[in-house]
Amino acid sequence: MRKIFFAGIMLFSILAMTVETVFAGAVVSLVEVRNDDGGVTFVFKVNSDFSRSDLNGGRVHVNGGGDFPLYCNQQDEETVVCHTSDRVSGAGVVVDFGGSRFWSLVPEQRTYLMSYCYMVYDWAVEETSWENIGGVCQKRSADVGDSIYFYNPAYGDYYYYSFLPQGQDYLSWPNPGVGYYYIAN
């Protein structure tokens, strides 16, 4: 029982020293943790300017092991935004920044925010129109010149398909619009 009591006193003392350090200078609050197309991001509210060494001195400790640096920039007088490794996704972490310590859960990466989906078109078997043979989703938006290697079930094989943002005008076939198209060489 004494061991538990003294461990509690020790933990409370460490917490009190951390709080004292925070209030002795800058006040830092963790206001947001997200994991979206910008990666793992921590947003802090602050009440003072931080030096470059203060901004680069933060760490993220993953429960069960692993330490990762924080890469921070002060956006304005009240906001510091920090990024760290995607390897902390979905983990419980302790974040050390600005003389303060915060415990948080990092959400899993939200892939639906990063998905760009496009239709894939090939010549219809009777070669009289474009046929939608499926769709493809990717992490970034497609650009002219991008190509994918995609399976066409009607022909039973894989082919290269090129991205065309305005679709493909071919003969008198209706243009289905944005997507990946089979382009004969």
Image: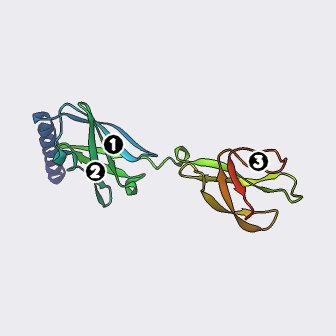
The location of residue 3, given as percent across then percent down, is 16, 54
Q: What residue type is labelled 1?
A: Phe
Give the residue pinned by disc 1.
42
Q: Eyeballing the image, is 183 above or below 17? A: below
Residue shown at the point (52%, 47%) measured from the top left: 114
- Looking at the image, the residue that sits furthest to the right is 126
Q: Which amino acid does label 3 sit on?
A: Asp
Give the residue pinned by disc 2.
70
Asked if the residue at tag 2 contacts the one at tag 1, i.e. Cβ–Cβ closer than 8 Å, the answer is yes
The location of residue 75, given as percent across then percent down, is 29, 36
The location of residue 43, given as percent across then percent down, is 32, 39
Crowd band around label 1 with a 10 angstrom C-alpha radius: few (<14), some (14–19), many (20+): many
Q: Nearer the viewer, residue 78 or 110?
A: 78
User: Which of the 4 image quadrants contains residue 31?
Assistant: top left
Q: Which of marks 2 and 3 is in front?
A: 3
Residue shown at the point (13%, 34%) measured from the top left: 23
- Looking at the image, the residue that sits furthest to the bottom is 157
Give the residue pinned by disc 3.
169
Q: What residue type is labelled 2?
A: Leu
Q: How far apart are marks 1 and 2 (CA)?
A: 9 Å
Q: Which of 121 and 42 is in front in this view?
A: 121
SS for dot 3: loop
Residue shown at the point (34%, 44%) measured from the top left: 104
Q: In which quarter of the image is the C terminus?
A: bottom right
Q: How far apart are marks 2 and 3 (CA)?
A: 50 Å
- Mark on residue 10? none
Q: Which of 72 and 162 is in front in this view?
A: 162
Q: How far apart are marks 1 and 3 (CA)?
A: 47 Å
- Ranked by sequence position, the earlier of labels 2 and 3 is 2
Crowd band around label 3 with a 10 angstrom C-alpha radius: few (<14), some (14–19), many (20+): few
